[in-house]
Image (cartoon, grey):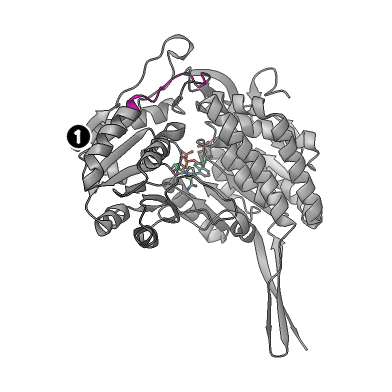
Amino acid sequence: MPLVDCMNKIQNYINGSMVAPKSGQWLDNFEPATGKVYSQVADSNESDVDAAVTAARNAFPAWSKTHATDRAAMLHRIADAIEANLDSLAAAESKDNGKPLWLARSVDIPRCVSNFRFFANLITGVESQSHNSDGMINYTLRNPLGPVACISPWNLPLYLFTWKIAPALAAGNTVIAKPSEVTPMTASMLGELCIEAGLPPGVLNIVQGSGSLTGNAIVSHDDVQAISFTGGTKTGKHIATVTAPKLKKLSLELGGKNPNIIFADCDYELMMETTLRSSFANQGQICLCGSRIYVQRSLYETFRDDFVSRVKQLSVGDPLEPASKQGAIVSQQHFEKILGCIERAKEEGGNVLCGGNAVSLAGRCENGWFIEPTVIEGLANSSESNQQEIFGPVVSIAPFDDADDAIAKANESQYGLSATIWTSNLNVAHRVAAEVESGIVWINCWLARDLRTPFGGMKESGLGREGGMEALRFWTEPKNVCIKF
Ligand code: NDP
């Protein structure tokens, strides 16, 4: 399949066709590993969004009435097409985002296939609720909402994009979707695959462009009935203020500053190997990465020395090299932000135990945006470094005394997305899991995912849940029907 057209222009997918933005304006798209522009992406405006919404509105009556088994079959066809193009999608994701190719190939793109297959299967097994009482039967219809919007970030580009689109389509909605302008490539390829798979025109529309122009036009559009957004807390709050007066349904998956709580009685080797991943996978640019590591005091020094020596061995390199454990940071702006956060941590009294610097690579990556995995200790729990999301390869470590202390430290945060707990004591594990303020808790594991479970955060990490039936509930309107006899 062609990645983009011969001019390396990433177009919109609207009403079943790949089309240029009406304004003729394009934005530069960079390869983070080289720091060079390698394509251009449509800089869509209100009229492109309006065309997408019109297409979605026109497609809605037929798609919403399509039998669930037929919608499921279509989603499976899209999953087949993604599977058949796994290598080219993984290569495009790695080039666009800077993540190691092996990671895109083994995690990101296979998960896109799972997202479509999972919701294709789920929609065919949905049951209706019924409430019976004296002389009455109530049953609940769940109807799709209409044209809806999915907006996703750059860190797991196609993975999070399809996590939203698949349930929205499965439930019978038509969709206007926007990927991040920073990583537009695989979303565009998805559009081409939908054409190949025979998705009816207008059922899915992918509008490329910036958040401030394209994203804002989508969320403000009167005919968009609901919005599922994943991104930063500040953007989520802005979208909430734009959509509240219009009473649009809203799901927000936002930032995090996740605690990783390590008790001395844990399975040490499993904890250590997993903590390396949960700290630095995807250069720490996963909303679920544990960025505040709390270690029980009796284990603290052993952990610190061992962890730092293993972090030093994580190779930072060309995302195309199988040996690179760490790839590039997604953009120059984000690269500079992370380095600024490290400087701020030093000002706040943080002691950088390893990392802390940009990495210069030779050859094709000499101008790429790479940062050493960084471990910092000595920061106050209330410091900006421990409170603000960095979203990069930077973690802080600190000791705690007992479960009460660990819970207090973990909960001293505006965020509440996920937490990880390491202990062999079941009582401690359950108690901390119950009291830690986060939407997702992993005990003795990290990023283990069952797509049926509720996914999302509390506090400033979000509003609502994705995953399984939670997603299908969000994407449908319940209607109670009461029969008296
Ligand atoms: P942003 O909030 O900057 O952007 C997210 C998406 O929203 C992008 O597509 C962006 O477009 C778009 N956008 C920006 N402004 C607007 C607007 N005014 N109206 C509508 N859309 C807009 O987040 P990042 O892309 O920087 O992603 C990183 C953030 O995402 C981190 O905070 C991370 O924690 C969070 N995240 C949360 C997850 C969760 O499940 N809770 C999962 C993954 C990430 P563009 O990029 O083109 O400007």
As displayed, is residue 317 above or below residue 258?
above
Picture coordinates of residue 422 (x, y %)? 37, 49
Tell me if I can see residue 173 in this picture: no
Quarter that holds the N terminus: top right
Q: Along the horizontal axis of the image, is 112 left or right of 431?
A: right
As displayed, is residue 450 above or below residue 484?
above
**Towards the viewer: 238 or 121:** 121
**Towards the viewer: 406 or 412:** 406
Q: Along the horizontal axis of the image, is 458 left or right of 140?
A: left
Picture coordinates of residue 270 (x, y %)? 41, 41
Q: Bin the neighbour count of mark 1 within 10 Å (Cα to Cα): few under 14, some 14-19, many 20 and up.
A: few
Q: Secondary structure at mark 1?
A: helix
Please check the rendered image and state whether residue 243 is part of the magenta-colored stretch, yes or no: no
Q: Along the horizontal axis of the image, is 67 left or right of 41?
A: right
**Towards the viewer: 334 or 393:** 393
As displayed, is residue 10 above or below residue 54?
above
Tell me if I can see residue 89 in this picture: yes
Picture coordinates of residue 244 (x, y %)? 51, 59
> Which residue, as the protein is rendered here, is positioned at the far left?
349
Quarter that holds the C terminus: bottom right
- Tell me the amino acid under the disc marked 1: Glu
> Which residue, as the protein is rendered here, is positioned at the far top?
363
Please give the name of the residue rendered at 31% of the width and 53% of the height, measured from the top-left corner: 410
Q: Which residues are magenta?
A: 311-322
As displayed, is residue 305 above or below residue 126?
above
**What count of labels does the image hold?**
1
Picture coordinates of residue 67 (x, y %)? 81, 56
Image quarter of residue 126: bottom right
Q: Main secondary structure of the magenta part?
A: loop
Tag 1 residue: 347
